[in-house]
Image (cartoon, rainbow, N blue to C red):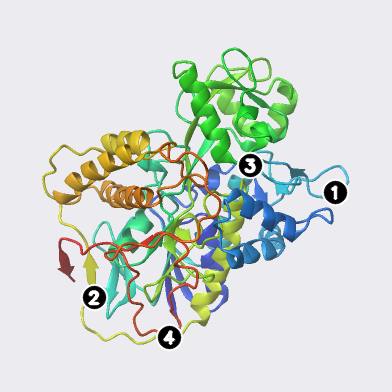
């Protein structure tokens, strides 16, 4: 029986775990917090899928391609939108109760850059929490082994393939296959909508193992995070219901940037917000939802409504202050359409993976759909793929040994550096400055804290990718090349960042679309520790 370790417990990880178990695998789910401590739980807007006769998969595909600035992989889009309805049905079967209209049909919301209302939601703005609860219950019911409060330190390698994981406490879990589903890298930035656990753990471990990564320059900044208290996402769906963005003078400024105004693609609206804030001395812009009214806001967006009111704001009567914040990573570990990476035995799904489906900018509410669709495919793939025997020699774990860091490294210093020089607006001077500081920090070896070491490693790859892509496209905006480029086919990696060999495993081949982006692999780590 194939032994599979799934690292991460959001929609992608739990879907992969369930499908792997249903395929006959022995599955262990490892998560560094409690089972529900995931990005999925915080997803408000909903899950996009074609569930209405008035909608078409062609329309959903076109919207996804447009939002991604044409850099999406067409095959990945076809999989995402074509399998969406089946994954929605599966979620319903597992207990997700999507909101319904008076006629019993799904209640569908409109979000930015969607041609039609196709976004399903549950309990108003608690879609992610409803999905998380249903999948968590399903995993517990199946008897899948669950290891909570167990953090991934690194992958175990033998004979060029992954053979398990090492936990932060030194325990090693052998496996025939490992599926990384650890989410993104929001904690790279000083301002983010992501929870504290989004520290790029899976991406960093994959890099150290030699896996190809790509599109790390494409970081999506959400236009509307509450600017009072701790950052809190105010869903795109609020603007879909009629809320507008205004500056200090009360003027709707978003139409200056795009004919769709507040419902333009996220990167466009986020930059419009940043420009308006700069013009008024850095003060937040305001989201005016008064036209919706307090009663409807409380009914449709109960989670956001509670957060707004906890901060002493009455958004049914007055506009509320909002600001852009880092939200989603379009790039990640390069995979094929079944989650296979360029390292045998290693799979990646969800925000950890780079399937190519999002291109340069993710379409709103495609993230939960991605986790459901590609999580299912990866879980089924590990059950099909041939597991080749590994020689009994000791595996190795790739890791950098901690040492003193000069100039001083702190997570806060890293986050401020990334926010300033590799954030919403970038240029060559700032990115070069960031690259130099990151190189100095890394030359003194990785920090002792595992999460800090992961963030530092992935930050260097984000900055490197942003330097290589010298034109503006999608979420990657270069002020030194401000005219957004049409679809850019390929930016070749330099001679020192070619894709790694994929070993002898016949089922693992370089993903067909792996060269359609800036792909990179790490330089050799400073130390290889034998097990």
Residue carrying label 4: 506
Neighbourhood count class around disc 4 (C-alpha, 10 Å): few under 14, some 14–19, many 20 upward: few
Mark closer to the observer (3, 2): 3
The structure residue drawn at horizontal position 23% and vertical position 67%, both measured from the top left corner, is 397
Q: Is label 4 in a helix, a strand or a loop?
A: loop
Q: Dividing the image into 4 quarters, which one contains the C terminus?
A: bottom left
Mark closer to the observer (4, 3): 4
Neighbourhood count class around disc 1 (C-alpha, 10 Å): few under 14, some 14–19, many 20 upward: few
Label for residue 45? Answer: 3
Q: Position of residue 369 (x, y in %)?
A: 62, 56
Closer to the camera in the image, 311 or 277? 277
Q: Is residue 109 above or below residue 468?
A: above
Q: Dividing the image into 4 quarters, which one contains the N terminus?
A: bottom left
Label for residue 395? Answer: 2
Residue carrying label 1: 104
Q: Earlier in the sequence, mark 1 or mark 3?
A: 3
Q: Is label 3 in a helix, a strand or a loop?
A: loop
């Amino acid at each position: 029986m194939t032994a599979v370790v799934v690292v991460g417990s959001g929609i992608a990880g739990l879907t992969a775990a369930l499908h792997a178990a249903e395929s006959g695998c022995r599955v262990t789910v490892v998560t560094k917090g409690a089972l529900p401590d995931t990005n999925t739980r915080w997803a408000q807007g909903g899950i996009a899928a074609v569930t209405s006769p008035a909608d078409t998969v062609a329309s959903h595909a076109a919207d996804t391609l447009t939002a991604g600035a044409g850099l999406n992989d067409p095959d990945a889009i076809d999989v995402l939108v074509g399998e969406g309805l089946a994954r929605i049905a599966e979620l319903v079967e597992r207990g997700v109760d999507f909101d319904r209209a008076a006629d019993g049909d799904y209640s569908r919301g409109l979000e930015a850059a969607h041609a039609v209302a196709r976004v399903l939601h549950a309990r108003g703005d608690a879609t992610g929490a409803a999905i998380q609860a249903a999948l968590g219950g399903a995993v517990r019911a199946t008897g899948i082994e669950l290891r909570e409060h167990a953090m991934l330190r690194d992958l175990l390698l033998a004979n060029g393939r992954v053979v398990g994981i090492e936990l932060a406490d030194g325990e090693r879990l052998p496996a025939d296959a490992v599926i990384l589903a650890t989410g993104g890298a929001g904690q790279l930035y000083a301002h983010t909508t992501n929870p504290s656990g989004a520290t790029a753990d899976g991406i960093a471990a994959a890099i150290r193992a030699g896996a190809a990564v790509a599109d790390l320059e494409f970081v999506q900044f959400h236009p509307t995070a509450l600017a009072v208290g701790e950052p809190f996402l105010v869903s795109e769906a609020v603007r879909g219901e009629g809320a507008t963005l205004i500056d200090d003078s009360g003027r709707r400024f978003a139409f200056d940037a795009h004919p769709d105004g507040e419902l333009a693609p996220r990167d466009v609206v986020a930059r419009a917000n940043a420009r308006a804030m700069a013009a008024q001395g850095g003060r937040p812009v305001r989201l005016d939802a008064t036209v919706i009214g307090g009663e409807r806001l409380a009914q449709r967006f109960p989670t956001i409504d509670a957060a707004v009111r906890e901060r002493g704001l009455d958004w049914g009567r007055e506009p509320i202050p909002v600001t852009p914040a880092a939200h989603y990573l379009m790039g990640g570990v390069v995979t094929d359409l079944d989650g296979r990476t360029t390292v045998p035995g290693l799979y990646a799904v969800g925000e950890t993976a780079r399937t190519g489906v999002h291109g340069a900018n993710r379409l709103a509410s495609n993230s939960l759909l991605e986790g459901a669709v590609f999580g299912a495919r990866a879980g089924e793939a590990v059950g099909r793929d041939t597991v080749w025997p590994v020689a009994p020699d000791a595996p190795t774990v790739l890791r950098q040994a901690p040492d003193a860091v000069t100039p001083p490294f702190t997570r806060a210093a890293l986050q401020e550096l990334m926010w300033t020089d590799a954030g919403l607006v970038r240029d060559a001077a700032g990115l070069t400055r960031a690259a130099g500081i990151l190189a100095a920090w890394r030359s003194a070896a990785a920090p002792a804290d595992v999460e800090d070491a992961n963030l530092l490693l992935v930050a260097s790859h984000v900055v490197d990718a942003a330097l290589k892509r010298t034109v503006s496209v999608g979420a990657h905006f270069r002020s030194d090349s401000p005219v957004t480029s049409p679809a850019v086919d390929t930016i070749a990696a330099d001679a020192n960042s070619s894709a790694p060999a994929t070993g002898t495993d016949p089922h693992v081949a370089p993903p067909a679309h792996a060269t359609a982006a800036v792909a990179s692999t790490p330089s050799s780590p400073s130390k290889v520790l034998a097990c």
